[in-house]
Image (cartoon, rainbow, N blue to C red):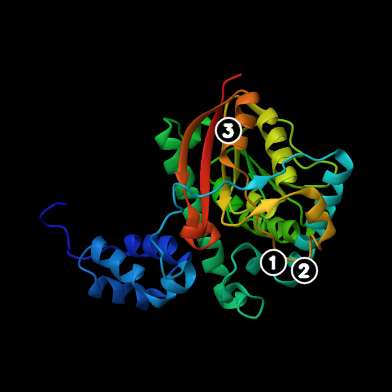
Amino acid sequence: MPHDAPPGVTREEIILGYRMFFGRDPEDEAVIQAGQAAWPDVASMGSAMAASAEFGARHGCNAHAQPPLDAPGNLVETEADVATLRLMAERLGGYWNRAGEAAPHWSVLTEERFLPQNIGANLEAFYASGAWDAQVLDATLARIGRRAEQFRHCVDYGCGVGRVTLQFARRFPQVTGLDISAPHLHLASETCRRAGFEHVALRQVTPEHLMPVESCDLWYSRIVLQHCPPPVTMNILRHAFRALDAGGVAIFQLPVWIRSYGFDLKTYLAGTPGGEMEMHAIPQRMILELADWQGMVLRDVREDSFLVGQPAAALSNTFTFEKMR
């Protein structure tokens, strides 16, 4: 740090801290200024946030724990016939269409301030939060020796109301947002239109076409695939890998272990799938094998279990693959 640098944490560091620890932005500038006055450095800020009641409620009392190395594996069925895949996708689409009609912004980021009765005062903060995803994308590409400028066509899978799509539109000459929910896509279209982004295409995912893009060189998905039954997710990934051009990159987040989780088609279909927001996991081995079969090479993998709740009870990864053939 230069000798003439002001003491304390910066505004940007506080915003980043809130996003990492609480999954949200600070309430207002007064909160940011209070943090700058209270915390002399990043370490003290992190300690205070980790000890806060909000962080404890969000992550549980053993927030820093990781799943044990001897944790038993999840038994997960990942294949289904065409008719069963279509049935699961139809039920999945039904849920997200209902969510898109009732609480579109909250269904993307499940925070009280983004509920329909609160979104008017927080709409700007909702869309501003997409900058963090774009920052993650930039950093991930940098770690594998790539830059956003090297890509032509970016697919934002599970784009919702366009929260992250707007950020990608500032980085890539062609962007396609895909989502299974028509109400979400309607809001995304209005948002992109108001922003003046004519190079953004929005397309609906259907049970018949779970990945309705034939070619791209960057495929991105975050806090989306975890809500899909494993056979649906594997089908999406299979088609995404096939659609990537040689040298293309896939970056996506997915839980790979959840305590006491299991998935078999018979039990799942006998329940009430599509009735609520679901959380699923696919063992890491299955993802790596599928990628290998499709000519993909793993370039980066990071843990991000805060996206799925208590870190000790789940393990989530953000994978980065490059297509070699």
Image spot of residue 111 (x, y percent): 56, 71
Taking the spot 67% from the left edge, 56% from the top edge, the residue there is 160
What amino acid is at disc 1? Pro
What amino acid is at disc 2? Glu
The residue that mark 2 highlights is 101
Q: Give the label, 2 or 3, closer to the camera.
A: 3
Give the answer, above or below, for where 183 lies relative to 77. Answer: below
Element type at marker 3?
helix
Q: Which mark is residue 104?
A: 1
In the rendered image, the residue lying farthest to the left is 3
Query: Horizontally, is 153 left or right of 235 in the view?
Result: left
**Foreground of the two, 176 or 206:** 206
Element type at marker 1?
helix
Element type at marker 2?
helix
**Foreground of the two, 33 or 62:** 62
Mark 2 vs mark 1, CA separation in Å: 6 Å
The residue that mark 3 highlights is 288
